[in-house]
């Protein structure tokens, strides 16, 4: 299109120049005629045919007509009377002007025809020359094409053959056919193709032949052939009917695809393995630019393949691991393999994960290193498990070592394997002296008989609990609660709790309880103890003697039976209020005795609190004030009688 526009522009410039030339020639002729007007007595216009002729010949009809018009106007205005007026007064001048105009028009059209004929002839000559050049180029290209076809035919890695359509005789074959069939080219030419090639599936051959004859070609036909009765192989077969050396022939292109298909299947299987792997499998170049990013990498790091391919692997490398990654790239680029390196990587969400990284070089068929393959396996959970196990072991050791109870580890052989500090202090033996001893060595003789049954219980995955006495190094003994259990590793864990202080405390508490009960049963008041919720847990003997109720093991609300019904709701409400506010109180109300009579009692209740101030029990007493009440009544009566 640019060429066409250039031609149009050039043509327009040429046309403008032609019109300018017409104006110039006419002006020069008019000027020359005016200069010679003094020497020429008669006014003639014949000289103006010269610029008209030249303008029409060189520029065509348009410039010729322009020159004609300018000539007529110039003659009328400058040369004919009246001078410098656009009118003609003489008949001769009028006819001369008319003749000039008519001549100019005739000359313009005649010269225009001549010019067009000349241009057309030149164009035809140019076309003939161009056609001649094109024919020469085509002949040269054809020769070159035939030469290139011959070279391509001979050197093609595919098997190329030309055979007659009528009898399948081989007319031309290339070296690839010779190598495949195992015969020289000269020996193959002239023989039918079926002498070398056998179709494994005759129906497939028939369908191929029909399609070739009906359509003139059959391309990319996958089939199985047997060459020279060797093993069957897969081929891509393309045939086209052509004219070769004046005969109808078939151009055949054979390409063995057995190895390629096996390679493609292997690559496909490998790609499927890579894509379906839960591990991140990453391909990168020597600069760390990611070239491949499988689904496992997307799942592990959170980045899609579109986000990572073409980007630096440093995107997932923490800042403190950049030097490590650069060192890895350098080593693997040199051919080393880095196996099972624990490291840390950064995910898209900013979290860090522990990975087990293996990096190895990627090599091509010539064993040249073309890139780096990295496999990252998420070991975050394993690391957490290891950390948890380490923490658990630390906690276990701390618990074992600093436990207040004695702990002994008994091996399956029955010997002590380990002991904590408390056990060593209880037994008065250092840890190294305990190692190798057996339970019978530290138990008093009377309790040694229990060892066999106890071991049988524990080894049956059951717990054993008892109280034994143990010997110290100095010959003294001490009582201890024994808890034994089999551990998952087959060893036995034995826990000893020295109960010497507990037994002393229990004895002291028993003595104190006995003193309290003796004192409570000796006082004249009714006494009782209630739990924090108000339920009675104990009465003294005086209560049972006065109320006539029978002692029971678990007393509760029996006291309500000894309160008169008209006072029971008041007493019950006061007792409930007392429990809620947790304050001591005094209250006087009657209690029914064993004889059925009521006597007034002053009840005092006091809460008993623990170290934190929480009420654990209520202690109450009921003091008989009946006689005091009767005395007060007699005093009031006497005072009333003495008043005037």
Image (spheres, rainbow, N blue to C red):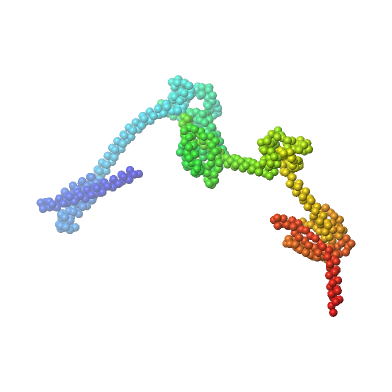
**Pick the front one: 23 or 518:** 518
The picture quadrant where one finds residue 637 is bottom right
Quarter of the rendering containing residue 608? bottom right
* The C terminus lies in quadrant: bottom right
Between 39 and 461, the residue placed more toward the observer is 461
**Image location of residue 166, percent across then percent down:** 47, 25
Q: Residue at x 66, y 43 (%)?
A: 402
Query: What residue is rendered at 17% in x and 51% in y?
Result: 30
Q: Residue furthest front?
A: 474
- Residue under the point 83% across and 56% down: 521
Task: Say left or right for 39 vs 328.
Answer: left
Is residue 211 something one can see in this rendering?
A: no
Residue 308: x, y in percent?
Answer: 49, 42
Rendered-image quadrant of the N terminus: top left
Work out which residue is located at the far right of the displayed protein and give it. Answer: 595
Total numbered labels: 0
Residue nearest the observer in this picture, 579 or 517: 517
Furthest residue toward top: 187
* Residue closest to the eye, 596 or 208: 596
Left or right, 149 with respect to 348, comes to left
- 228 up-or-down from 114: above or below: above
Residue at 76% x, 46% y is: 503
Question: Is any atom of residue 59 visible in this view?
Answer: yes
Residue 638: horizontal and vertical position, in percent? 86, 74
Q: Tell me where residue 197 appears, x and y as whole percent.
A: 51, 24
Outermost residue toward the bottom? 644
């Amino acid at each position: 299109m640019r060429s066409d526009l250039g031609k149009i522009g050039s043509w327009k410039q040429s046309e403008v120049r032609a019109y300018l030339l017409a104006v110039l020639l006419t002006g020069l002729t008019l000027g020359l005629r005016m200069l010679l007007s003094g020497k020429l007595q008669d006014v003639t216009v014949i000289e103006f045919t010269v610029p008209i002729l030249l303008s029409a010949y060189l520029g065509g009809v348009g410039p010729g007509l322009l020159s004609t018009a300018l000539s007529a106007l110039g003659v009328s205005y400058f040369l004919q009377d009246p001078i410098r007026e656009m009118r003609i007064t003489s008949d001769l001048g009028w006819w001369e002007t008319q003749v000039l105009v008519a001549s100019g028009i005739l000359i313009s059209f005649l010269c225009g025809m001549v010019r067009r004929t000349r241009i057309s002839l030149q164009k035809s000559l140019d076309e003939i020359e161009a056609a001649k050049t094109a024919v020469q180029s085509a002949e040269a290209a054809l020769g070159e094409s035939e030469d290139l076809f011959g070279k391509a035919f001979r050197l093609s890695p595919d098997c190329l053959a030309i055979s007659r359509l009528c009898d399948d005789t081989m007319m031309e074959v290339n070296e690839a056919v010779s190598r495949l069939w195992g015969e020289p080219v000269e020996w193959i030419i002239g023989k039918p193709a079926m002498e070398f090639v056998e179709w494994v599936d005759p129906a497939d051959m028939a369908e191929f032949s029909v399609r070739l004859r009906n359509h003139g070609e059959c391309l990319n036909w996958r089939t199985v052939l047997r060459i020279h009765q060797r093993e069957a192989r897969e081929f891509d077969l393309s045939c086209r009917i052509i004219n070769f050396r004046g005969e109808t022939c078939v151009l055949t292109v054979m390409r063995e695809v057995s190895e390629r298909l096996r390679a493609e299947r292997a690559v496909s299987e490998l790609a499927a393995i890579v894509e379906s792997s839960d591990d991140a499998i990453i391909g990168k170049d020597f600069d760390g630019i990611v070239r491949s990013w499988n689904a496992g990498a997307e799942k592990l790091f959170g980045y899609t393949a579109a986000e990572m391919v073409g980007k630096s692997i440093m995107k997932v490398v923490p800042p403190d691991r950049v030097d490590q990654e650069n060192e890895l790239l350098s080593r693997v680029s040199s051919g080393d393999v880095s196996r099972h390196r624990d490291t840390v990587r950064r995910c898209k969400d900013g979290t860090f994960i522990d990975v087990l990284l293996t990096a190895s070089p990627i090599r091509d068929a010539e064993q040249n290193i073309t890139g780096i393959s990295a496999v990252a396996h998420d070991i975050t959970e394993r690391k957490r498990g290891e950390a948890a196990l380490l923490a658990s072991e630390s906690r276990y050791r701390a618990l074992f070592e600093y436990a207040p109870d004695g702990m002994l580890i008994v091996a399956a052989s029955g010997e002590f394997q380990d002991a904590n500090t408390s056990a060593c202090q209880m037994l008065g033996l250092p840890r190294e002296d305990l190692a190798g001893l057996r339970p019978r060595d530290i138990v008093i003789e009377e309790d040694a008989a229990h060892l066999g049954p106890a071991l049988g219980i524990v080894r049956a995955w059951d717990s054993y609990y008892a109280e034994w006495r143990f010997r110290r190094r100095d010959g003294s003994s001490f009582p201890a609660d024994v808890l034994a259990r089999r551990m998952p590793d087959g060893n036995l864990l034995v826990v000893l709790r020295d109960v010497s202080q507990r037994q002393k405390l229990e004895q002291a508490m028993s003595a104190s309880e006995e003193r309290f009960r003796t004192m409570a049963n000796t006082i004249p008041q009714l006494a009782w103890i209630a739990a924090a919720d108000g339920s009675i847990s104990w009465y003294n003997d005086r209560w049972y003697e006065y109320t006539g109720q029978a002692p029971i093991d678990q007393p509760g609300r029996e006291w309500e039976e000894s309160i008169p019904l008209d006072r029971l709701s008041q007493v019950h409400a006061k007792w409930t209020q007392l429990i809620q506010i947790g304050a001591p109180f005094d209250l006087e109300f009657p209690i029914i005795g064993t004889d059925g009579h009521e006597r007034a009692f002053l009840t005092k209740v006091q809460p008993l609190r623990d170290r934190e101030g929480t009420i654990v029990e209520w202690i109450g007493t009921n003091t008989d004030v009946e006689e005091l009440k009767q005395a007060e009544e007699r005093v009031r009566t006497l005072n009333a009688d003495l008043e005037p």
